[in-house]
Image (tube, rainbow, N blue to C red):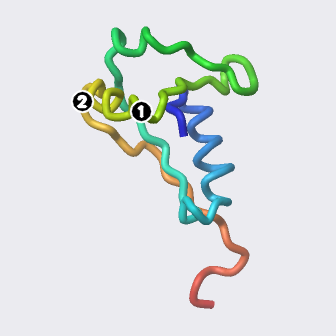
Amino acid sequence: MPPSTNREYATQIARDWNTKDAASGYVGYVTQFHVSSDYLKSFEVQTVGAANVHQEYWIPAERLDEFNANIVGKIEVIDRFVRETETPPGR
């Protein structure tokens, strides 16, 4: 997923999409990290839904190593969502 610009959108992706996706293991994480503002200036914020909420940076795959090199500090997991099941496992 492209990096979102706000926690609300990241939460929607993790909670509403990733928990329904087998490829995500039915788990979604919200992470927080900082990227060099000088580096981000080369990318426009893309609005992909509701204005002011569904905004993200589209980083081309071939520039992912460069993007990662511009992360400042640590990446923190600030929320985790797991698919809810009707029957708890083991019952």
Location of residue 12 with respect to 58 vertically, above or below:
below
Q: Residue at x 57, y 16 (%)?
A: 45
Tell me which residue sits at (32%, 17%) in the image: 36
Q: Where residue 73 is drawn, which disc sits there?
A: 2
Q: Quadrant of residue 7?
A: top right
Residue that carries the numbered disc 1 in the rendered image = 62
Relative to the observer, which residue lies in front, 65 or 68?
65
Secondary structure of the residue carrying numbered label 2: strand
Above-or-below relation of 42 to 76: above
Q: Is residue 34 left or right of residue 9?
A: left
42 vs 25, nearest the viewer: 42
Amino acid type of the residue tagged 2 in the rendering? Gly
At horizontal 26% and vertical 29% (from top left) the residue drawn is: 69
Amino acid type, callout 1: Glu
Whether residue 12 sits left or right of residue 43 in the image: it is right
Q: Residue furthest bottom?
A: 91
Give coordinates of residue 80: x percent, y percent: 49, 52
User: Vertical placement of 43 versus 1: above or below?
Assistant: above
Tell me the distance, in whole angstroms, between the alpha carbons under discs 1 and 2.
22 Å
